[in-house]
Image (spheres, helix red, strand yellow):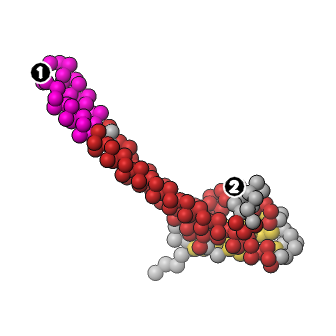
Amino acid sequence: MTTASSGLIELRLNNVGQLFNTMDPSPFHERDLDHDAEEFILSWAREHERDSVLRIRVVLRQPADPQAARLVEESIRHYFEYRARISRRELGELFREGRSALLIGLFFLASTLVLRDLIPTGARWSDFVREGLTICGWVGLWKPIDIHLYRWWPLKAHGTLLSRLSKCPVEVVFEG
């Protein structure tokens, strides 16, 4: 039995304000993370193995402040929980879109096949039109096939990563 490797993600900041989006008017513990901080955390999390135990360490070059430490911990967890919920919602919307596209595509395919059978055979132009309708009908299924076979993978992986980050321990260290 192998043990999961440790996945430390360390941010070094001058002060706690660098962690948050300065344009967000929300209360401190509900604020969005700064885009650069979020991208830094996500990129480092992707670098670690999928079975590694992720940990976030925020090193602040400021005097120790237990309240700020607690708020940073809560804010990071809260932010990634929120982003994971959004990711799950986006995945659900993609699958709904895929189901709708599948119904529309199947209806379109059936319609083109019925039209194809209504065109008389024998003439050169009729063979061209009949084959064109068959191809168009099958092309109408391209989007639902793409969604259900390929497009959901990256969303699922991103959501899983966000969920892992929302559950990982956050440590705040002060240097100053």
Q: Main secondary structure of the magenta part?
A: helix
In the picture, the disc for residue 35 is: 2
Q: Residue furthest bottom?
A: 1
Q: Quickly name the residue at label 1.
A: 122
Query: Which quadrant of the figure contains the C terminus?
Result: bottom right
Amino acid found under the numbered disc labelled 2: His
Left or right of 146 on screen, residue 90: right
Give the image location of residue 18, x and y in percent. 79, 60
Within the magenta stretch, is there residue 166? no
How packed mark 2 is, by other alpha carbons closer than 10 Å (few <14, some 14-19, many 20 or more), is few
Residue at the spot x=29%, y=33% of the render? Answer: 136
Q: Residue furthest left?
A: 122
Q: Total label count? A: 2
Query: In which quarter of the view is residue 9 placed?
Result: bottom right
Q: Toward the viewer: 19 or 29?
A: 29
Query: In which quarter of the view is residue 107 placed?
Result: top left
Residue at the spot x=64%, y=69% of the render? Answer: 78
Give the image location of residue 36, x and y in percent. 71, 55
Report the magenta residues as a range. Answer: 109-137
How packed mark 1 is, by other alpha carbons closer than 10 Å (few <14, some 14-19, many 20 or more), is few
Left or right of 112 on screen, residue 58: right
Residue at the spot x=79%, y=73% of the render? Answer: 68
